[in-house]
Image: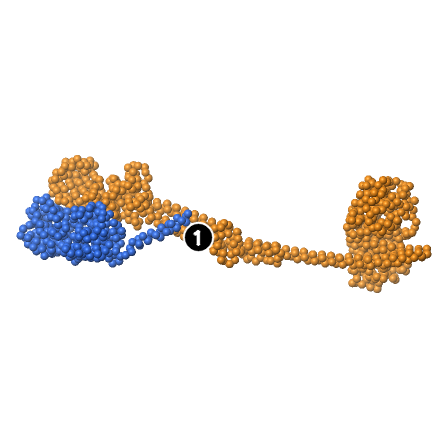
Amino acid sequence: MKRRDFIAGLTGTAIMPFDARAQQRATPVIGFLNGGSSERFAYLLPAFRRGLSENGYVEGRNVVIEYRWAEGDYGRLPSLAGDLVNRRVDVIGAFGNSAPVAKAATNTIPIVFQIGSEPVAFGLVPNIRRPGGNITGVTNMAEELIPKRIELLHELLPVAAIAALINPLNFGAPAHVKFAQAGARTLGIRLHVLNATSQHDFDGVFAKIDELQVGALLICPDPLFAGQSKQLADLTGQHAVPTISGIREFVTAGGLMYYGDDIQELYRLVGVYIGRILKGENPGDLPVVQSTKVELVINLTTAKALGLIIPLVLRARADEVIE
Amino acid sequence: MSVPANHLFAPLAQVRGWRQINGPLFRKYVALFLVVVCIVLTGNGLFEVVFYYQDHKSSLIRIHREQAAAAANKITQFIKEIQSQIGWTTQLPWSGTTLDQRRVDGLRLLRQVPAITELSQLDPAGREQLRISRLLIDEVRGDTDFSADPKFVEAIANKAYHGPVYFRRESEPYMILSMAGPGRDTGVSVAEVNLKLIWDVVSQIKVGEHGQAYVVDAEGRLIAHPDISLVLRNTDMGRLAQVAAARALDAGGAAEPAQVANDIRGREVLTTHAPVTPLGWLVFVELPADEAYAPLRKALLRSGALLAAGLALAFLSAVFLASRIAVPIQAMRAGAARIGAGDLAQRLSIKTGDELEALADQFNRMAEQLQDSYANQERKVDERTQQLKLANLAKSRFLATASHDLRQPLQALGLLVAQLHGTPKAAERKRLVDRIDTAVAVMNELFDALLDISKLDAGVLAVNTTAFPVGRLLERIESTFREVTRDKKLSFRIVPSSVWVRSDPLMLERSVLNLVSNAVRYTDKGGVVVGCRRRGETVRIEIWDSGSGIPKDQQQNIFSEFYRLDRNRGGFGLGLAIVDRLCRLLDHPVELTSTVGRGSRFAVVVPAAPNEAEFAAPTSSLIRTPQDEHRAVDVGPGQDLAPLRVGDRRVLVIVIEDDPLVLDSLSGLLRQWGCRVVAAAIPGAVIASIANEEPPDLIICDLQLAGGRSGVAAIAELREAFRATIPAFLISGDTAPEQLRDAQQSGYHLLHKPVRPMKLRAVLSEYLRKHDALGAIRCL
């Protein structure tokens, strides 16, 4: 009797390590789909890899990543997505405005998206808690913060009208507009929506800003804009437009203000989720994660250049100042 | 041993000599040894495992409890910290600050505490005057009335309020914390706290490899978990046994908190908890049971391996040790078997240096002794056989010589009788009868001597030691040999002596007589001297002769039966043999000194006795006294004897004798003496013939009758038949020692054939005289 138990115990301990090994039979492949610029967004990849490593996946060692960048040309996304699907990748990470395309491309391959919008509203998932299906992801409150950004701008410079830069090709564009309008309405200021689909449009946009004589600019969240932060920052400086953006790189590149949450965190969370899915978890069981950290960064140099004095309330709010 | 034990030993059968040691003893010892070791190791292992299990479990639980308590503490601190920060905004009275100031203070608080996503301030009346948010546009002077809201009411009452955990957007845990200032006029600050940041606290708790900590609120809903998705899913943990038990405990229930339960994924875990007071939350720390017990399994494995190794070692040791016992024992058993089978030269060689070796040595010694005693036996048997052979040879020689010696007179007898047939004249007849008498006398003498020797050999002679003067003996010797020595012209001197000796007078006399007889026979010239020499306690009776002497190499032989130094001198060669036996019986040493051609000196050493000791008359013995002998010689045959009578009538004698010749001659002689004789071979016939008559006066019966019948029994039968104790005596031709003993024991007088007529007559007279109760017996 005791012998049997002992043998069972012995077998039990022998079997346990096997389970872990059995799963990593073939090297998994991750499809990295991004609507933005590989150059500009490259700085986010370490965060992504960090997220993967939290579950033991290291690129090149036990996992392969197939990168597909649309370089700002969203029209290329469907074919890129299709390519990944044909390659039968094990999971797709859909970044930079590529979520809906990825969802349309496959029903079977797990997808983890990174968006700035509300996923249920855009039909990506039926609910937050348990998406079901093959899609889940992380979201920040990029578009929800639009009204707040307007408020911050307004606090700095109580202008009568502001402009909002929107990329109509972004699937969240209609929501951006809605939020901007609501914010403007609450504050009692006029809103001008300006569209840009590529960086060539920027000059035209700023020309329009000068023409309309709006007092400030809100840059809506978009991978294109995110990728062109430097250019935009320069332009805002040139045209002397106080601007607020949801991209951190904007304010470090010379833009006036940044209010938002850290995209790097989002990329990390996607990496974590992808790792878990590779380990065998069902994407349908993973709820949509929402980012929690928001911060206000003000570039004092730019403010001085613009001849603006930062009021106390704003200073009180600022988590960081750039001098 | 049972079959399984045999199987256990099966593989060892290959070992050489296995059969030799694989006995029940061996198996018993090996099995016993194994069982003992097994019990010890198993017991030890079990104890270890059981106690280890207990210790391990309790130590793990203790650790986890500490971790849970630490985590609970951290969470409490976190909340307290937020509350304290919020407290900054309610320090001053409401009226003492402007809204802008409050706004700035609020924003600073927001920056200070990232967990707060929204802060609103209610004026002392409970109306919301300020709301600043990270996500939404701030609201100033909203004036919404929260005066009935618990976040206001309770804050005012208790200075602090914490609301239940709720989920924003279905997935984010939030909690309302409100604080009131020191006075009633400071208003209330209400903060919306995002509890996701508690997740950091929880996820930092390291619980083994795969363990985790999590927090549930007062309703049992998960508010923090390393796997954020579970939290976002708003998982209800209340179903879990440990949560329910902990909540019961918290509520004051007496239930013992579960220590082993299933977690949310259904795995078995070791679980402990700590409360986060006063929020009513519970921090759980859980470790998968597999991991918790992994060391236990390792310990079990260790014990198992140890047990196996121990058993193997024990088995080998047991085999070795048991064989060390079994092999010598088997060797001894085999050795003993061989010795038992008769191989006494078998020796055991066991060199184990212990008791077994000592046992084997004893065994060998025993075998040696057995061997020796066997050899001894055999030697003794050989000796005896040799002795018997010699005795046999001696007997044969004895018989041969005896029969040879007998033949001479017998031969003469035959011839003389033959001559008688020729009816010679009376003078010739007388001469022949005299010669016949002589021949018969010679034969009688021989038989008498044989009988003497037989009696001596049978040991039936009783030594009657008494003190008597040796002079008496010397006198008789003198009278006996006076004539013979005169006839041979030898000088014969007896030195008189007054010495008294202690001995059997008859036997001593006989010995001396024989010695003197020999001396006389072997001396042709010169003479014989007999004298006594007193030496301290002993007296030497010495017989000197100037005869032919005895060579040294014959001096032993002459004491043998039928040994005659010189055949021409006559005699039977029995005299010295008789002397030898008599003196051995009397324990008197006999000495001999002799020189060939000069003479010999024989001496008998006799113990001296004090003088004037009483001289007891010699009692009758079976040995013929010299008187008897000479009387017999003197009384010649042919004298007419008076018939025997009892009163007036003739004596009735019954003769039972199976030898017809003896029967006839005896009967004839008795009739000649005037007796009436009824003779038969068996008593039955006699009884029949005189059944109606008076009982007989005497019974003469042969000791051994035909058909192995005993003469003693025949006498008894006759006595029975006549219902009278008829006097009886036995005659016997047997001189065998056993017969003599039987006869002695029977109590009847025994006469030996051939019975000399005169002797017979004398005995008869004696018997008849003694039994005069039957009537006056007169010898007319």
The residue labelled by disc 1 is B310
**Along the line of sight, the residue nearer the viewer: B242 or A126:** A126
Q: Nearer the viewer, residue A173 or B210?
A: A173
Residue at disc 1, secondary structure: helix
Answer few, some or many: residues within 10 Å of disc 1's Cα (few below 14, many 20 plus, some between 14 and 19): some
Give me the chain that's blue: A
Q: Quadrant of residue B123?
A: top left
Residue B756 % position (x, y): 86, 51
In this rendering, position of residue B424 left or right of residue B725:
right
The quadrant in which residue B139 appears is top left
Residue B129 appears in the picture as rendered? yes
Q: Compared to B724, does A58 lie above or below?
A: below
Residue drawn 79% across the image and 45% down it = B713
Q: Nearer the viewer, residue B779 or B553?
A: B779
Q: How is colour applied across the structure in the image? A: by chain
Decide if residue A165 is on the left or right side of residue B200. left
Amino acid carrying label 1: it is Gly
The image position of residue B706, as x and y in percent, is 80, 49
Place residue B699 in its image quadrant: top right
B769 left or right of A171 in image? right
**Disc 1 chain ID:** B
Judged left or right of residue B621, residue A72 is: left
Q: Report x, y in % for residue B353.
A: 54, 56
Expressed as whole percent of the image width and height from the top left, the position of residue B118 reads 16, 43
According to the rendering, which colour does chain B have?
orange
B349 versus B225 height, above or below: below
What's the residue at 80%, 47% (across, down)?
B711
The tally of labels here is 1
Instruction: State the residue in front, B423 or A19.
Output: B423
Mark yes or no: residue A239 visible. no
Q: Is residue A160 above or below residue B347?
A: above
